[in-house]
Image (cartoon, rainbow, N blue to C red):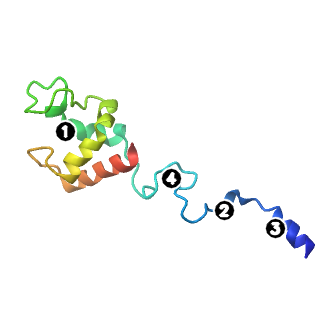
Amino acid sequence: MIWLALLWGCTDDTDLPPPPGTDTGTTADSGVPAGCEDLPHVTYENWAWGFLTTYCQGCHASTAPDRYGAPEGVSFDDEAEALAWADRIEVRTLTQQDMPPAGGVPSEELEILGWWLDCGL
């Protein structure tokens, strides 16, 4: 009986899950945000750059000849600028669905945009 108590006291608890109600914000040891572990890995380099170039840069490039009413300074010329506007990109494109104003973004692309905004940043 004593050896059982000693054995119990010597177990390594690093493999135990966190206590219930503990939000670690990521899945165990992966660094992936919770809820994103089964989604494709979407980054600026492998997807978002192409999306922004195709659907946003016509108005939101600092070098656009006609910004069609896009506010000065709201440009997505590089990853840093896109990240700075990520919250607004999400609201205008996924929530309000008024960007791009001409529409035309396939629903599959909008889904991937959501993955990038939620999991790839």
What's the residue at 20%, 56% (across, down)?
107
Local crowd size for mark 4, using a 10 Å CA cut-off: few (<14), some (14–19), many (≥20): some
- Estimate the spatial distance between the alpha carbons at disc 2 and disc 3, rounded to whole Å: 14 Å
Measured from the top left, where is residue 111 in percent x and y? 27, 54
Residue labelled with disc 1 = 54
What's the residue at 25%, 32% (across, down)?
76
Name the secondary structure under disc 1: helix
User: Label 4 near label 1: C-beta < 8 Å?
Assistant: no
Residue labelled with disc 4 = 26
Residue labelled with disc 3 = 8
- Estimate the spatial distance between the alpha carbons at disc 1 and disc 3, rounded to whole Å: 60 Å
Three-letter code, disc 1: Thr
For this orientation, the residue located farthest to the bottom is 1
Closest to the camera, between mark 1 and mark 2, is 2
Please identify the quarter of the rendering in which residue 78 is found. Answer: top left
Instruction: Please give the count of numbered marks on the rendered protein.
Output: 4
What's the residue at 8%, 33% (across, down)?
69
Three-letter code, disc 3: Trp
Name the secondary structure under disc 4: loop
Local crowd size for mark 2, using a 10 Å CA cut-off: few (<14), some (14–19), many (≥20): few
Q: Nearer the viewer, residue 66 or 46?
A: 66
Measured from the top left, where is residue 74 in percent x and y? 21, 31
Name the secondary structure under disc 3: helix
105 versus 10 height, above or below: above
For this orientation, the residue located farthest to the front is 21
79 versus 121 height, above or below: above
Mark closer to the chain start, 3 or 4: 3
Q: Nearer the viewer, residue 91 or 39?
A: 91
Please identify the quarter of the rendering in which residue 108 is found. Answer: bottom left
